[in-house]
Image: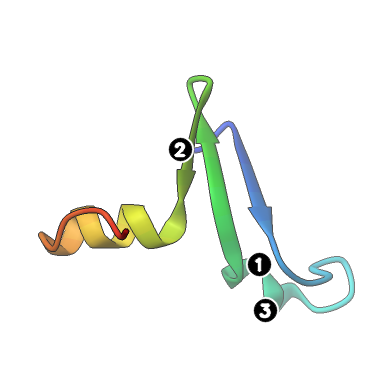
């Protein structure tokens, strides 16, 4: 679970925009969602 997630949109107005997460902060480390998805899919980090 993330400590903080940063997204693009207004989830207070439209709850479906919660899926637009772009950055995750966990344990003082910052991760891009693209890099996390690449790691899970086995394709490695994005350039």
Which SS class for mark 1?
helix
Mark 3 or 2, nearer chain start: 2
Disc 1 to disc 3, C-alpha distance = 5 Å
Q: How crowded is mark 1: few (under 14 residues within 10 Å), some or many (20 or more)?
A: some
**Quarter in which the C terminus is drawn:** bottom left
**Quarter in which the N terminus is drawn:** top left
Q: Residue at x 57, y 60 (%)?
A: 22
- Which residue position is annotated with label 2? 1
- Which residue position is annotated with label 1? 18
* Quadrant of the image occupied by residue 34: bottom left
* Quadrant of the image occupied by residue 40: bottom left
Task: Measuring from the top left, give residue 38's x and y in whole percent.
Answer: 24, 61
Q: How crowded is mark 2: few (under 14 residues within 10 Å), some or many (20 or more)?
A: few
Between residues 20 and 1, which one lies in front from this camera angle?
A: 20
- Which residue position is annotated with label 3? 16
Q: In this view, does 11 lie to the left or right of 27?
A: right
């Amino acid at each position: 679970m993330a400590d903080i997630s940063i997204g693009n949109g207004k989830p207070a107005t439209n709850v479906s925009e919660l899926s637009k997460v772009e950055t995750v902060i966990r344990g003082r480390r910052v991760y891009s969602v693209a890099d996390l998805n690449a790691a899970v899919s086995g394709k490695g980090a994005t350039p």
